Image: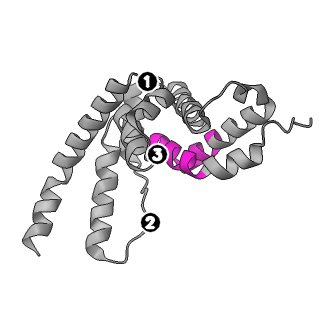
Amino acid sequence: MKMPAGPDIARLYDEHAQPLFAFLLNLTRDEADTRDLLQEIFVKLAREPRLLDSVREERAFLIRLAHNAAIDLMRRRGTREKTKENFAAETISLFAPASDPDEAVFREQLTQALAELPPEQRAVAHLKLWAGLTFEEIAAALEIPPNTAASRYRYALDKMRARLRPLYEEMKKTE
């Protein structure tokens, strides 16, 4: 079956696949699941090109599709507690390896701190810190109020700050 060309799927993929992959990986914590979800999103767009007809903000729409696909995957996998246990057991580094040992330790600790966040907070923190979205853009993408996005971000930063404070103090001592 030949799929319709749609609204330049190749361009959408080139512009958005890499940040969507990082976002999904941060949510699923599994590279294979992330690749499957990313493929699912773009196949859906290729099969249903009209989905993009009334879209004003491509990035927000694609983030919403990715978020919903990840949530659907988590629901298919069972209860929320079981999903949290799976996330905690498998930590995927979001950072490239570092040659400086201190930098490598910091990146590992930051990865652990992110993994310990609830998925809702992790999603907002990722979109704010790595994708550079505003709270309004995050709210639109995740279909939550802007104040909720800001609160989740604040809670995420507080938890990461508390988690990373001992490392920071240790690094200050060795300077």
Going by the numbered disc 1, the residue's amino acid type is: Thr
Magenta portion: prevailing SS class: helix
- Magenta stretch encompasses residue 32: yes
Q: Secondary structure at mark 3?
A: loop
Going by the numbered disc 3, the residue's amino acid type is: Arg
| Nearer-N-terminus badge (1/2) | 1
Q: Position of residue 159 (x, y in %)?
A: 22, 41
**What residue lies at 25% left-to-right and 36% top-to-bottom?**
154
Q: Identify the residue under disc 1.
A: 79
Give the CA separation, mark 1 to mark 2.
32 Å
Q: Residue furthest right?
A: 1
Q: Identify the residue under disc 3.
A: 29
Instruction: Identify whether 108 is placed above or below 63.
Output: below
Give the CA separation, mark 1 to mark 3.
16 Å
Residue 78 is at least partly visible in this image: yes
Q: Nearer the viewer, residue 109 or 135?
A: 135
Q: Are marks 1 and 2 in contact (CB under 8 Å)?
A: no
Q: Which residues are magenta?
A: 18-37
Tell us which disc is closer to us: 1 or 3.
3
